[in-house]
Image (cartoon, coloured by chain):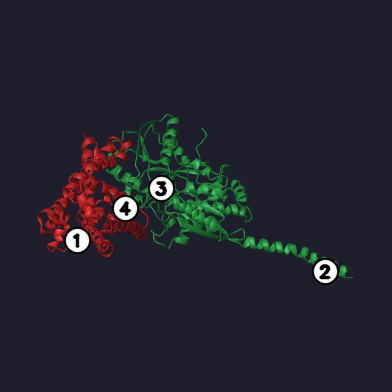
Amino acid sequence: MDLWVLNLLNGISFGMVLFLLAAGLSLTLGVMGILNLAHGSLFMIGAFVGFFVFSGGGSFWVAALLAGAIAGLVGLVLEKAFLGRLHNLFDAQAMLLVGVVYILGNLGLWIFGPQNRLASPPLSLAFSVRIGNYTFPAYRLALILIGTIVFISLWWLLAKTRIGAIIRAGMDDREMTTGLGVNYGLISTAVFSLGAFTAGFAGAIALPMIGVAPSIAWDILLYSFIVVVVGGMGSMLGSLIGSLFIGLVDTFSRALFPDIATFTLYTVLVITLLVKPSGILGRKGILQDMERL
Amino acid sequence: MRSIGSLVVFACVCLVLILSAPLMATHVEAAATSKPIRIGFLLTQTGYGAMGPWEEHGVRLAIDDAGGKIAGRSIELVAEDSATDPSVSLEKARKLVEKDKVDVLMGPVMGSCSPGVAVYAKEAGIPYIFNCQHSREVILSGGKYAFNPMGTTAWESYPIGRYVFEEMGARSINVIHDDFDQIVEIGTIAIEAFRRRGGKLVQRQRTPLGTVDYVPNVSVMKKADVVLMWFVPFNALRFTSQYFDAGRKMPLVMFGNPTLNEMDLPMVGDRAIGMIATAPVTCGIDIPPMKAFIDRWLKKYGHLTEKEGRYPRKHEGIFNYVAVQMYLEAVKATGGDPSADRIRDALLNIRVETPGGWVSFTPEGIGIGDIYVLKVVKEGDRLYWKDIHTYKQVARDIPPE
């Protein structure tokens, strides 16, 4: 019983980290049709910023917000200076973003060195709770709470605010939205920066669990792609469900079938693409919309 | 008269040529010996396996310790970055040999990159010195001019299986490690060494390289006297932290090089105290040659920051030093002749005192040296790997028992 409870909690906490990571990617893809291959690099930037601010004596939570802000700024520059000039040129965008990943990775190596980093959780959460014969870090329980708060915030932004209505309208029919006088270009830039912010924030928040090294970008990007495909592009609830699903599948497959755990996530991905390519809660017609963009 | 005159002139010319021959030979020889000895080194500066500045520091220190010259010839280093990429490694190896005309090839350290380079070096007929342990098959694939002072990867793990049974008194082991060929092989050897002595394997888990969360694996670990583990550096850091976070108490033993180096240990904290590993050399070994080596390192690099490689915390720096040191001693033994056959003969006959103790080679080019069992200890604020047991002067290969 302890084993099931432990892995259930672990799967949910890991899923929340994936949600923090994938939420921004899902938004960017849903709003702008851009598959941000540099998303993992933004996660890496946030993680490094968070690590150095926190280990330098700063508050963990301030470090996480600062990490998000800096990643958001990098995202803003990326979108305005580069991606914005390649509107609708998806191949060129992809090539650009791959180049950005290598540049940011090597910059990270140059500035921060090749050393792997893993942070301790903040003192207030540096304890474990007993679950039968095991202990479970309180920080991982906090991740569940943090993920929930971020989800509610993003959901509220999209569902209950005027800006959110504009974003959703643009996702459904960009031409019409622009025709109504909305500066959707500005909205897109803001959404891209928000996506970058959440990636950077996720990087810092996940430090005590995942750590950071300059090479982390591609590894973490893969997880976020799987979540976005499974959960559905452009949907916050889809991202949450996808993240939790992937977190639990990954956790239990490693615990119960470690020898085939490598294939489990890819199996889920393939099945999703075959059965429901728009994802669990992806917007209907999103794939067609992306072709029209 | 005319024919006698021509004969005299011809005889004089011959005499001049004969008398000047030794001088010309000397000039040619001088030209050859004044050419520097060129060491081609494949470093790993970028990519996921980036080693940082310690690698190059080790190489340059070895050259400095030789005074920048060997057997009257200056030493020139031509270094390239392998980018942790097998195809880049091979491309750079070709460039070093065919364009830069190096006399010897060394590196890279990553196990995925060096096999191709070893085979190329064999085809090129150039001496090749590995700068890290590798499988026996890969070392031998480098041909008769390939040497590995650090020995085989199997060598690292066999003593641990033995140590855990004989010295730690363990009778059951739980094994967990990254899932790629080389590690699966050396894990199997450690298990075999343990089982041969009567120990029992209770469980073995092979985790994919991209794993970020080890708690699921930790949660299903069956009870044993000892956990034998090995992961690439980043994964080792994650696994160790998550293992202790989950409240597991079985002693952790790495069946090979400690991939948690001194800079990683503080991130695990005091929980790492007592961890065990094996290595041919690390900076924590308490022997005079290592102390002298550290002094020389600090003299050259002590003004740098930790990140810039002030202290030889990463053993790859020491491995590189040893690789260059062994080669330069061989060049010294040949009187400055870097030709492959002479270097091979020299390497097979020399015995060199390296920072990790005396090293020589088997007829197959596999290092013979000391094997250290290490343990994480804390002295003051410093957590480091300290040698606690030595297997003296063994061929760094699987024993024939």
Which chain is home to disc 1?
A
Three-letter residue code for mark 3: Trp
Which chain is home to disc 4?
A
| Residue B125 drawn at (x, y percent) | 58, 49
In this picture, residue A162 sits left or right of residue A91: left
Q: Which residue occupies the foreground of this view, A104 or B41?
A: A104
Please report contact status of discs 1 and 3: CB closer than 8 Å, yes or no. no
- Find disc 1 in the rendering and name its residue: A190
Three-letter residue code for mark 2: Val
| Residue A107 drawn at (x, y percent) | 35, 60
Write down the colour of chain A. red
Q: Which residue occupies the foreground of this view, A173 or A229?
A: A173
Split into 4 quadrants, where in the image is the C terminus of chain A?
bottom left
- Find disc 2 in the rendering and name its residue: B9
Is circle 3 on the same chain as circle 2?
A: yes
Separation of disc 3 and disc 2 at Cα? 79 Å
| Residue A203 drawn at (x, y percent) | 26, 53
Q: Nearer the viewer, mark 1 or mark 3?
A: 1
Which of the numbered marks, if any, corresponds to residue B385? Answer: 3
For label 1, the SS is helix
| Residue B272 drawn at (x, y percent) | 34, 45
- Find disc 4 in the rendering and name its residue: A217
